[in-house]
Amino acid sequence: MRLHFYAISTLENSQLFISASAHSPFSSSEVWTQITPPRSHMAQSGAGGGIAAKRGKLSSSDADAGVDGEDRLSALPDEVLVLILLRLRTTTEAARTSVLARRWRRVWLLLPELRFHLAPDGHRIRKVLLAPDAPPPLHRISVVTEDSAPDSLGAWLPDAARRLSGALVYHRIVPGVEDLASPMPDEAGEGGTIQLPCFEKATRIEINLGLLGLDLPLAGTFAQLTELALYRVHLRGPIELGDFVSSPRSPRLQKLRIRDARGVDKLTIHSESLLEVDLRRLKGFQRLSISASALNELNLLKCFGKNQPVAFICAPQLESLAWTDSYDPSSVDLGNLGQLQVLRTNGFFVFSKPDCRYNRDFLRLLQQFRFIRSLGILLFYQRDIGNFPYLMEDITMLPLTEFLTVEVVNNGHNFGPSSFHILRLCTGIRRLSMKLHIIRGLKSACHPGCICDQPANWKAQELSLNRLRKVELAGLEGTEHEVVFLEQLFSWATVLKKMEITFDYSVSKSKGRSRCSCLPRKTKKTRSE
């Protein structure tokens, strides 16, 4: 195992290099040191270079005293050595510097941060936290484990709560679940339960339990907590999540993110400090109630599912709302949204059954607004649209907007007709951003004569986007459908000043330039992702 340090300009006009090779964290073997002294020293000695020494099989006494008095590194102040060790990726690597000299055996214990990647058993982490020479405050504890047992995590959490005065980040990697966007299996929480202690001085907590259960603390105040993120947890116990994140127990909480959680059927929040709430994929979720005078941003994604959505929102300062979920005005009260500037909606199926519930919720939500400064819309094409009817005509009006974002999952189908329909309802826009999402590994079901070309007369209809000055297009593959839409867009946007086109990474630069060469010579920029 080889360990490298690099410290540049730690001392004035000095460079330090260390390479230590060790078979165990606390064994001595080969150590090389090279120190480039200040120029004044070089001038006096006439060496014109560094002083190098190779030390083999150092004893502890030799390491402490240094060979020929040239162990300048160990003579540095503790705070400088700590800065050097913080350059290492993990605390385990920092601990291995104990082989350098006796003094180094305690230096790594002074680190204000503990970082463990694929950490050892939790009981060993606890020993580090309980080290007698370690200072009380820790600014950050970051632990990544792979499929660890609940008792391993429970072994060190209480001690971490006593020492932490900063951020706690814990991620439990579960084989077969690649990232946070992957669906969480139904057996979540069956592997055991973690008891979360009270972190009175923690400022940020981010926990991904990877299917394990979580019990919130029965008592105590998280007085300094400003950010809480819970991923892939199954909340259990008598304490409601809403009580835990409300002002009495979390008086400074500003950002709340709950994703892929179980055991949250209702969430009631009363907070004077919350600025941002992000809720995604809460299985079994039924009711949301938020009273937050300072709340600025609310994101709700796939929480209610097929359940009747029930929500009450009192957030007079809300500026950004992403409601990509079920919506029914008879059971959802969004309150006074006079300050709202940004709105993102549920997806709309371009071709589907006439009673599509996603489309119904989309229309119901947009009917609540007359003006939104920035509006985001998602258009979705099923891979096989068969003989489904074209449903864009159901959208008869959209809020007045200045900045329009249209995301399209077209599965290879022609998105020109649906995009034209949206644009003719938003003729006052100043900026347009379009993003095509590609589902890789699936072949397009689009074929000659596919109904996605309907209505075919969209290219012949007049449209004036006489305020549109900037266009951003991303995710293009260089298809004929895309080129036709670009040509039409240029003809509609008569005062366009700038267009930026980003092709998918699968498209070569030469193909991208070739596709854009047929466009009028207006200000444009192309690139590949």
Image (cartoon, grey):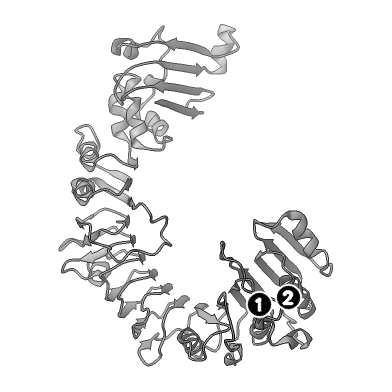
**Residue 376 in sight in this render:** no
Mark 2 nearby-residue class (10 Å; few <14, some 14–19, many ≥20): some
Report, in whole angstroms, how far the alpha carbon at label 2 lies from the one at label 1. 8 Å
Residue 30: give its label.
none
Total numbered circles:
2
Asked which quadrant contains residue 376, the reply is bottom right
Q: Residue at x 41, y 38 (%)?
A: 89
Q: Quadrant of residue 198?
A: bottom left
> For residue 485, which numbered disc appears in the image?
2
The amino acid beneath tag 2 is: Phe
Seen in the picture, residue 45 relative to 315 is either above or below; the reply is above
Q: Which residue in the protein does label 1 denote?
A: 415
Q: Amino acid at mark 1?
A: Phe
**Quadrant of the image containing the C terminus:** bottom right
Provide residue 193's location: percent of width, then percent of height. Answer: 20, 58
Callout 1 secondary element: loop
Direction from residue 391 to residue 486 in the image, left or right: right
Residue 225: x and y, percent? 30, 59
| Image position of 314 with respect to 444: above or below | below
Residue 149 image offset from top left, x and y in percent: 23, 49
